[in-house]
Image (spheres, rainbow, N blue to C red):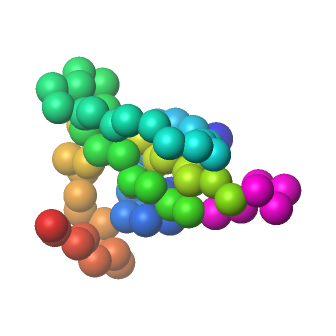
């Protein structure tokens, strides 16, 4: 799945879809630096999509056409 994260506009490595609660802990995660959460719907079921960004993807950060919200 290629594309851009709908939250931050960066490329993402993978996306996962969750219907229920879950725990996210990216402290010292070797592969992923950030996960953006985007609420949505899949076949009328409310879900949350998790867009996983690697360290490299969050470090690129020089897309001039996009604002980069920091904190
Ligand atoms: Zn993102």
In the figure, residue 68 lies in which quadrant?
A: bottom left
Q: Is residue 67 above or below residue 50?
A: below
Left or right: 28 with respect to 5?
A: left
Q: Residue at x 23, y 25 (%)?
A: 29
Can you see residue 54? no
x and y, in percent, of residue 23 in the image: 38, 35
Q: Residue at x 31, y 66 (%)?
A: 63
Report how many numbered discs are placed on residues in the image: 0
In front: 47, or 57?
A: 47
Q: Is residue 21 above or below residue 40?
A: above
Left or right: 59 with respect to 31?
A: left
Q: Main secondary structure of the magenta part?
A: strand
Q: Reply yes or no: does residue 47 show up in magenta.
A: no
Dividing the image into four quarters, tell me where ligand 1 lies: bottom left
In front: 70, or 56?
A: 70
Q: Which residues are magenta?
A: 40-45
């Amino acid at each position: 799945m290629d594309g851009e994260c709908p939250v931050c506009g960066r490329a993402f490595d993978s996306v996962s879809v969750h219907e229920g609660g879950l725990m996210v802990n990216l402290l010292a995660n070797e592969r992923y630096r950030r996960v953006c959460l985007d609420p949505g719907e899949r076949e009328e079921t409310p879900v949350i999509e998790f867009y996983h960004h690697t360290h490299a993807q969050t470090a690129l950060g020089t897309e001039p056409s996009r604002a980069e919200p920091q904190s």
